[in-house]
Amino acid sequence: MDFNISTYLSLLGALKDSGYAFQTFENFLIKPEKRGIILRHDVDLKPINSLLFAKLQEKEGIQGTYYFRAVKESWDEDIIKEIHSMGHEVGYHYECLTTTKGDFNLAFEDFKLNLNKLRELVPVQTICMHGSPLSRFDSKDLWKKYDYKDLKLIGEPYFDIDFNKVLYLTDTGRTWNNRKISVRDHVSKKFNTEFKNTVNIIEAANRNKLPQQIMFNFHPQRWTNNKLEWSKEYILQNMKNQIKRFIIKN
């Protein structure tokens, strides 16, 4: 089965054996590795799963970036601080135009409020949009009116990475081939890569067929060795994917 912890560890091992260095998004912006991996994690749900990822990475001497939403399903202050204490980066996973129903002024105030709350717990240098696929509002549009760099933030992946140079791989929709089911978690890129599953990525790494720089985006809530939790996630995600296909089509 894909999307389990064993497969995830095999992926990390293959990437390490292929000579990649691992960076947080913050460190990538400051000094990118020529052959580097950014491990991004969107903590949409089940922050305890993200804590497991963080511990596994720490054991391997790897650092990643974790973006927390300002909702109870994601925001766990003890876990936020523990992940940061391991040397990982923590950032804000904002969805302000969704929560304020498109009111730009309210959204910016909400953004600043949540950013400051997170900064009371840990240092925050980068942010990342939460897609909110069922909403008609794209929270990235907030930056058409405001500038996040005015808030002493140095980057947002969708604006500050050249995805013609950095391959973007995301498990959105519980698949790596997600063009037909990803409402907002996609980028313009020159790479023509198609991976049916994580094993395909591992095989490409073993054959040295991956680009020099890659950003992975993981949603840790869908990665588990627990068969019951794995099955629940599989069923629920398939239902969500049908809804997202309808949204994209229409």
Image: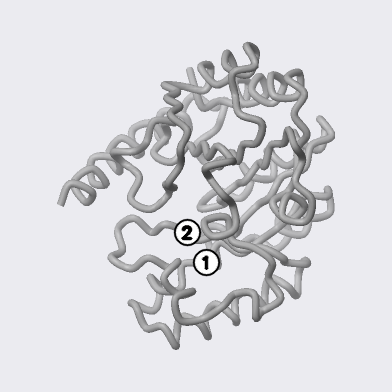
Query: What x and y, as percent, mark residue 19?
Result: 77, 23
Secondary element at image label 2: loop
Q: Residue 55 lies in what quarter of the image?
A: top right
Tag shown at residue 130 = 2
- Tell me which amino acid carries mark 1: Tyr
Left or right, 131 with reference to 9:
left
Q: How many tags in the picture?
A: 2
Residue drawn at point x = 34 percent, y = 78 percent = 102
Question: Is the Cβ of the residue at disc 2 closer than 8 Å to that at disc 1?
Answer: yes
Query: What x and y, as percent, mark residue 66?
Result: 65, 52
Secondary element at image label 1: strand
Residue drawn at point x = 51 percent, y = 53 percent = 44
Query: What x and y, as percent, mark residue 47?
Result: 61, 50
CA neighbours of label 2 inside 10 A, class few (<14), some (14 to 19), many (20+): many
- Tell me which amino acid carries mark 2: His
Rendered view: 119 above or below 14? below
Tag shown at residue 38 = none
Residue drawn at point x = 69 percent, y = 66 percent = 154
- Estimate the spatial distance between the alpha carbons at disc 2 and disc 1, rounded to whole Å: 6 Å
Q: Residue 9 lies in what quarter of the image?
A: top right
Residue 94 can be seen in this image: yes
Left or right, 120 with reference to 131:
right
Left or right, 211 with reference to 135:
right
Residue drawn at point x = 17 percent, y = 46 percent = 249
Rendered view: 81 above or below 230? below
Query: What x and y, as percent, mark residue 239?
Result: 27, 39
Q: Nearer the viewer, residue 19 or 44?
A: 19
CA neighbours of label 1 inside 10 A, class few (<14), some (14 to 19), many (20+): many
Tell me, what colour scheme is on the image? one colour
Q: Nearer the viewer, residue 148 or 235?
A: 148
**Residue holding disc 1:** 94
Q: Nearer the viewer, residue 101 or 35?
A: 35
